[in-house]
Image (spheres, rainbow, N blue to C red):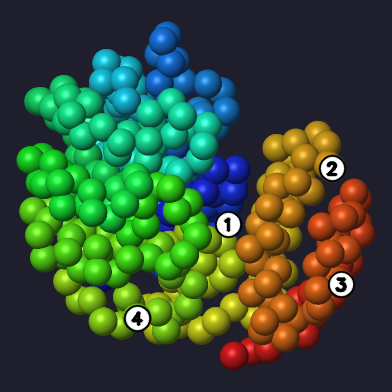
Protein backbone atom coordinates (compact mmCIF):
# COMPACT_ATOMS: atom_id res chain seq x y z
CA UNK A 1 0.00 0.00 0.00
CA UNK A 2 1.38 3.39 -1.03
CA UNK A 3 1.36 6.48 1.17
CA UNK A 4 0.62 9.97 -0.12
CA UNK A 5 1.07 13.42 1.40
CA UNK A 6 -2.16 15.39 1.05
CA UNK A 7 -2.00 19.08 0.14
CA UNK A 8 -2.86 21.65 2.81
CA UNK A 9 -2.98 25.20 1.54
CA UNK A 10 -0.44 27.43 3.26
CA UNK A 11 1.28 24.54 5.06
CA UNK A 12 2.61 21.92 2.64
CA UNK A 13 4.90 24.30 0.75
CA UNK A 14 8.09 23.16 -0.95
CA UNK A 15 9.96 24.11 2.22
CA UNK A 16 7.69 21.89 4.29
CA UNK A 17 7.86 19.01 1.77
CA UNK A 18 11.64 19.05 1.67
CA UNK A 19 11.96 19.06 5.45
CA UNK A 20 9.42 16.25 5.79
CA UNK A 21 11.21 14.09 3.20
CA UNK A 22 14.66 14.84 4.61
CA UNK A 23 13.88 14.18 8.29
CA UNK A 24 11.21 11.48 8.19
CA UNK A 25 10.59 10.28 4.62
CA UNK A 26 8.08 7.52 4.01
CA UNK A 27 5.76 9.25 1.53
CA UNK A 28 5.59 7.71 -1.94
CA UNK A 29 3.99 10.74 -3.53
CA UNK A 30 3.44 14.41 -2.63
CA UNK A 31 0.57 16.59 -3.82
CA UNK A 32 1.09 20.34 -4.12
CA UNK A 33 -1.63 22.72 -2.85
CA UNK A 34 -4.05 23.60 -5.63
CA UNK A 35 -3.50 26.21 -8.28
CA UNK A 36 -6.14 27.61 -10.65
CA UNK A 37 -5.87 28.72 -14.26
CA UNK A 38 -6.66 32.35 -14.96
CA UNK A 39 -7.99 34.06 -18.08
CA UNK A 40 -4.42 34.72 -19.17
CA UNK A 41 -2.62 31.46 -18.47
CA UNK A 42 0.49 32.31 -16.52
CA UNK A 43 2.24 30.70 -13.58
CA UNK A 44 2.77 33.22 -10.81
CA UNK A 45 6.14 33.64 -9.11
CA UNK A 46 4.69 32.10 -5.95
CA UNK A 47 3.43 29.06 -7.88
CA UNK A 48 6.76 28.73 -9.71
CA UNK A 49 8.59 28.59 -6.39
CA UNK A 50 6.34 25.72 -5.29
CA UNK A 51 6.47 23.70 -8.51
CA UNK A 52 9.94 24.20 -9.98
CA UNK A 53 11.80 20.86 -10.04
CA UNK A 54 14.88 22.39 -8.40
CA UNK A 55 12.78 22.97 -5.26
CA UNK A 56 11.45 19.40 -5.27
CA UNK A 57 14.46 17.21 -5.97
CA UNK A 58 13.91 13.58 -5.04
CA UNK A 59 10.20 14.22 -4.48
CA UNK A 60 7.49 12.69 -6.67
CA UNK A 61 5.27 15.78 -6.85
CA UNK A 62 1.81 16.04 -8.42
CA UNK A 63 0.33 19.49 -9.14
CA UNK A 64 -3.30 19.82 -8.07
CA UNK A 65 -5.65 21.91 -10.21
CA UNK A 66 -8.82 23.61 -8.94
CA UNK A 67 -11.09 24.65 -11.79
CA UNK A 68 -14.20 23.96 -13.87
CA UNK A 69 -12.76 25.81 -16.88
CA UNK A 70 -11.87 23.09 -19.37
CA UNK A 71 -9.85 25.31 -21.69
CA UNK A 72 -7.95 26.82 -18.77
CA UNK A 73 -7.24 23.38 -17.33
CA UNK A 74 -5.83 22.09 -20.60
CA UNK A 75 -3.67 25.16 -21.17
CA UNK A 76 -2.32 25.10 -17.62
CA UNK A 77 -1.48 21.38 -17.62
CA UNK A 78 0.27 21.67 -21.01
CA UNK A 79 2.24 24.67 -19.73
CA UNK A 80 3.29 22.80 -16.57
CA UNK A 81 4.39 19.88 -18.73
CA UNK A 82 6.33 22.03 -21.17
CA UNK A 83 8.08 24.13 -18.53
CA UNK A 84 8.61 21.59 -15.75
CA UNK A 85 8.00 18.17 -17.28
CA UNK A 86 4.99 17.16 -15.17
CA UNK A 87 3.26 14.03 -16.48
CA UNK A 88 0.55 13.66 -13.83
CA UNK A 89 -2.11 16.04 -12.53
CA UNK A 90 -4.79 15.92 -9.86
CA UNK A 91 -8.24 17.51 -10.06
CA UNK A 92 -9.67 18.92 -6.82
CA UNK A 93 -13.37 18.14 -6.37
CA UNK A 94 -12.97 17.88 -2.61
CA UNK A 95 -12.29 21.35 -1.20
CA UNK A 96 -15.37 22.35 0.88
CA UNK A 97 -14.36 25.99 1.48
CA UNK A 98 -17.30 28.37 1.10
CA UNK A 99 -15.42 30.72 -1.24
CA UNK A 100 -14.47 27.80 -3.48
CA UNK A 101 -17.88 26.11 -3.42
CA UNK A 102 -19.70 29.39 -4.19
CA UNK A 103 -17.85 29.48 -7.54
CA UNK A 104 -18.89 25.93 -8.40
CA UNK A 105 -15.37 24.57 -7.89
CA UNK A 106 -13.94 22.00 -5.51
CA UNK A 107 -16.78 20.15 -3.78
CA UNK A 108 -19.13 22.72 -5.36
CA UNK A 109 -18.58 20.99 -8.71
CA UNK A 110 -20.48 17.98 -7.34
CA UNK A 111 -23.76 19.89 -7.22
CA UNK A 112 -24.37 19.55 -10.96
CA UNK A 113 -23.40 16.20 -12.50
CA UNK A 114 -24.34 17.27 -16.03
CA UNK A 115 -21.97 20.22 -15.84
CA UNK A 116 -19.31 18.01 -14.29
CA UNK A 117 -19.74 15.47 -17.10
CA UNK A 118 -19.34 18.18 -19.75
CA UNK A 119 -16.13 19.36 -18.09
CA UNK A 120 -14.65 15.85 -17.74
CA UNK A 121 -15.63 14.93 -21.31
CA UNK A 122 -13.76 17.96 -22.64
CA UNK A 123 -10.57 17.56 -20.65
CA UNK A 124 -10.19 13.77 -20.94
CA UNK A 125 -10.67 13.60 -24.72
CA UNK A 126 -7.13 12.89 -25.88
CA UNK A 127 -5.55 14.09 -22.63
CA UNK A 128 -1.91 12.94 -22.87
CA UNK A 129 -1.02 12.87 -19.16
CA UNK A 130 -2.07 10.84 -16.12
CA UNK A 131 -5.08 12.31 -14.34
CA UNK A 132 -6.34 11.58 -10.84
CA UNK A 133 -9.40 13.00 -9.09
CA UNK A 134 -9.77 13.90 -5.42
CA UNK A 135 -13.44 13.90 -4.48
CA UNK A 136 -16.03 13.98 -1.75
CA UNK A 137 -18.87 11.41 -1.91
CA UNK A 138 -21.43 14.04 -2.85
CA UNK A 139 -22.19 17.61 -1.94
CA UNK A 140 -25.36 17.49 0.17
CA UNK A 141 -26.07 13.82 0.86
CA UNK A 142 -24.26 10.49 0.55
CA UNK A 143 -27.18 9.29 -1.56
CA UNK A 144 -25.51 11.21 -4.41
CA UNK A 145 -22.48 8.92 -4.33
CA UNK A 146 -23.67 6.07 -6.58
CA UNK A 147 -24.45 8.39 -9.49
CA UNK A 148 -21.23 10.34 -8.96
CA UNK A 149 -19.13 7.18 -8.93
CA UNK A 150 -20.90 5.99 -12.10
CA UNK A 151 -19.79 9.25 -13.71
CA UNK A 152 -16.15 8.79 -12.65
CA UNK A 153 -16.28 5.23 -14.01
CA UNK A 154 -16.73 6.65 -17.52
CA UNK A 155 -13.15 7.88 -17.49
CA UNK A 156 -9.74 6.26 -17.27
CA UNK A 157 -8.23 7.85 -14.17
CA UNK A 158 -4.85 7.04 -12.71
CA UNK A 159 -6.51 7.12 -9.27
CA UNK A 160 -9.74 8.11 -7.58
CA UNK A 161 -8.92 9.69 -4.21
CA UNK A 162 -12.01 9.45 -1.99
CA UNK A 163 -12.64 11.55 1.10
CA UNK A 164 -15.83 9.88 2.39
CA UNK A 165 -17.65 12.96 3.62
CA UNK A 166 -20.03 15.16 1.64
CA UNK A 167 -19.07 18.73 0.87
CA UNK A 168 -21.52 20.29 3.31
CA UNK A 169 -19.94 18.40 6.20
CA UNK A 170 -16.67 20.28 5.75
CA UNK A 171 -14.48 18.28 8.21
CA UNK A 172 -17.23 17.62 10.77
CA UNK A 173 -18.62 14.26 11.77
CA UNK A 174 -16.89 11.03 10.84
CA UNK A 175 -15.99 9.61 7.42
CA UNK A 176 -18.69 7.38 5.92
CA UNK A 177 -16.87 4.08 5.61
CA UNK A 178 -19.82 2.41 3.90
CA UNK A 179 -19.51 4.96 1.12
CA UNK A 180 -15.80 4.24 0.84
CA UNK A 181 -16.39 0.47 0.77
CA UNK A 182 -18.88 1.07 -2.04
CA UNK A 183 -16.10 2.75 -4.00
CA UNK A 184 -13.73 -0.16 -3.40
CA UNK A 185 -16.28 -2.59 -4.80
CA UNK A 186 -17.63 -0.49 -7.67
CA UNK A 187 -14.88 1.81 -8.90
CA UNK A 188 -13.26 0.93 -12.21
CA UNK A 189 -10.29 3.09 -11.24
CA UNK A 190 -7.70 2.46 -8.48
CA UNK A 191 -9.04 3.85 -5.17
CA UNK A 192 -7.12 5.93 -2.64
CA UNK A 193 -8.45 6.64 0.87
CA UNK A 194 -8.27 10.13 2.39
CA UNK A 195 -9.72 11.38 5.67
CA UNK A 196 -8.97 11.36 9.41
CA UNK A 197 -5.89 9.13 9.37
CA UNK A 198 -4.21 10.32 12.56
CA UNK A 199 -2.58 7.19 14.02
CA UNK A 200 -1.06 3.96 12.73
CA UNK A 201 -3.85 2.08 14.52
CA UNK A 202 -6.50 3.46 12.17
CA UNK A 203 -8.78 0.67 10.95
CA UNK A 204 -8.37 1.77 7.32
CA UNK A 205 -4.67 0.96 7.48
CA UNK A 206 -5.27 -2.40 9.13
CA UNK A 207 -8.31 -3.74 7.30
CA UNK A 208 -8.31 -2.75 3.64
CA UNK A 209 -5.66 -4.42 1.51
CA UNK A 210 -7.63 -3.50 -1.64
CA UNK A 211 -6.79 0.18 -1.20
CA UNK A 212 -4.29 1.39 -3.79
CA UNK A 213 -2.93 4.06 -1.42
CA UNK A 214 -3.71 6.17 1.63
CA UNK A 215 -3.44 9.96 1.51
CA UNK A 216 -2.79 11.72 4.82
CA UNK A 217 -2.99 15.46 5.48
CA UNK A 218 -3.78 16.81 8.94
CA UNK A 219 -2.55 13.64 10.66
CA UNK A 220 0.79 14.03 8.88
CA UNK A 221 1.19 17.65 9.95
CA UNK A 222 0.45 16.59 13.54
CA UNK A 223 2.89 13.67 13.40
CA UNK A 224 5.42 14.10 10.58
CA UNK A 225 6.77 10.59 11.20
CA UNK A 226 3.41 8.93 10.54
CA UNK A 227 4.49 7.52 7.16
CA UNK A 228 7.60 6.06 8.76
CA UNK A 229 5.51 4.54 11.54
CA UNK A 230 3.04 2.96 9.12
CA UNK A 231 5.99 1.33 7.38
CA UNK A 232 7.18 -0.14 10.68
CA UNK A 233 9.48 2.63 11.89
CA UNK A 234 9.58 4.53 15.16
CA UNK A 235 7.58 7.51 16.36
CA UNK A 236 9.42 10.86 16.38
CA UNK A 237 11.63 11.84 19.30
CA UNK A 238 11.73 15.32 20.76
CA UNK A 239 15.18 15.81 19.26
CA UNK A 240 13.97 14.81 15.80
CA UNK A 241 11.05 17.21 15.96
CA UNK A 242 13.33 19.97 17.21
CA UNK A 243 15.70 19.48 14.26
CA UNK A 244 12.78 19.23 11.83
CA UNK A 245 11.06 22.41 12.99
CA UNK A 246 14.38 24.27 13.21
CA UNK A 247 15.10 23.26 9.61
CA UNK A 248 11.73 24.63 8.49
CA UNK A 249 12.31 27.81 10.51
CA UNK A 250 15.70 28.49 8.94
CA UNK A 251 14.37 27.87 5.42
CA UNK A 252 11.54 30.35 5.96
CA UNK A 253 14.00 32.89 7.37
CA UNK A 254 15.77 32.75 4.00
CA UNK A 255 12.41 33.01 2.20
CA UNK A 256 11.01 35.97 4.17
CA UNK A 257 12.49 39.21 5.47
CA UNK A 258 9.95 39.47 8.29
CA UNK A 259 10.05 37.45 11.51
CA UNK A 260 6.28 37.80 11.69
CA UNK A 261 5.87 36.02 8.35
CA UNK A 262 8.21 33.24 9.46
CA UNK A 263 6.31 32.85 12.72
CA UNK A 264 2.99 32.74 10.89
CA UNK A 265 4.17 29.75 8.86
CA UNK A 266 5.53 27.95 11.90
CA UNK A 267 2.42 28.59 13.99
CA UNK A 268 0.21 27.07 11.28
CA UNK A 269 2.10 23.81 11.71
CA UNK A 270 1.85 23.96 15.50
CA UNK A 271 -1.95 24.19 15.32
CA UNK A 272 -1.83 20.51 14.37
CA UNK A 273 1.45 19.37 15.91
CA UNK A 274 0.91 21.02 19.31
CA UNK A 275 -1.91 18.74 20.53
CA UNK A 276 0.00 15.67 19.27
CA UNK A 277 3.13 16.69 21.21
CA UNK A 278 1.16 17.44 24.38
CA UNK A 279 -0.69 14.11 24.16
CA UNK A 280 2.68 12.36 24.07
CA UNK A 281 3.81 14.08 27.25
CA UNK A 282 5.62 17.07 25.83
CA UNK A 283 5.10 20.48 27.40
CA UNK A 284 1.72 21.89 28.32
CA UNK A 285 -1.26 23.77 26.94
CA UNK A 286 0.27 26.92 28.42
CA UNK A 287 3.51 26.37 26.48
CA UNK A 288 1.52 25.99 23.26
CA UNK A 289 -0.56 29.11 23.95
CA UNK A 290 2.57 31.14 24.66
CA UNK A 291 4.18 29.87 21.46
CA UNK A 292 1.12 30.92 19.46
CA UNK A 293 1.15 34.40 21.01
CA UNK A 294 4.82 35.23 20.58
CA UNK A 295 5.99 37.79 18.03
CA UNK A 296 9.72 37.07 18.27
CA UNK A 297 11.64 34.05 17.03
CA UNK A 298 13.87 33.89 20.10
CA UNK A 299 10.78 33.51 22.32
CA UNK A 300 9.23 31.03 19.88
CA UNK A 301 12.32 28.81 20.11
CA UNK A 302 12.22 28.85 23.92
CA UNK A 303 8.56 27.76 23.94
CA UNK A 304 9.28 25.09 21.32
CA UNK A 305 12.04 23.66 23.53
CA UNK A 306 9.61 23.58 26.47
CA UNK A 307 7.05 21.72 24.39
CA UNK A 308 9.48 19.13 23.08
CA UNK A 309 11.76 18.56 26.07
CA UNK A 310 9.47 16.11 27.86
CA UNK A 311 8.28 14.15 24.82
CA UNK A 312 7.99 10.45 25.53
CA UNK A 313 10.02 8.10 23.35
CA UNK A 314 7.05 5.81 22.61
Q: Which residue is drawn at 26% across and 32% down?
A: 112
- Left/right placement of residue 89 relative to residue 223 reads left
Q: Distance between the residues labelled 2 and 4?
A: 41 Å
Q: Distance between the residues labelled 1 and 4?
A: 28 Å
Closer mark to the observer between disc 2 and disc 1 = 2
Residue bearing mark 3: 286
Q: Distance between the residues labelled 2 and 3?
A: 22 Å
Which disc, if any, is residue 19?
1
Question: Residue 195: where, in percent of width, then height?
Answer: 40, 62
Mark 4 is surrounded, within 10 Å at the Cα level, by few (under 14), some (14 to 19) or many (20 or more) other residues, namely few
Q: Which residue is drawn at 15% across and 46% down?
A: 147
Q: Which residue is drawn at 68% across and 89% down?
A: 312
Q: Is mark 3 on a helix, strand or loop?
A: helix
Q: Is mark 1 on a helix, strand or loop?
A: helix
Q: Distance between the residues labelled 3 and 1?
A: 27 Å
Residue bearing mark 2: 259
Q: Residue at x 55, y 81 (%)?
A: 235
Looking at the picture, does residue 240 appear above or below residue 35?
A: below
Residue bearing mark 4: 203
Amino acid sequence: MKLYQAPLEGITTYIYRNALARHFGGADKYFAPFISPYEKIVISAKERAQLTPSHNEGIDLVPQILTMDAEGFLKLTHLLHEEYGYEEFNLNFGCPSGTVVSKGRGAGALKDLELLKEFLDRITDGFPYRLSVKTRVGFSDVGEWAALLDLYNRYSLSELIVHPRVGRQMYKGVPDMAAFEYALVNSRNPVVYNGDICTVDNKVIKSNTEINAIMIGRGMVANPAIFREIKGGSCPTGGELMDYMSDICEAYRVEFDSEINVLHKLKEIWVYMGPYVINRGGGSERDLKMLQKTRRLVEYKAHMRSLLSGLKST
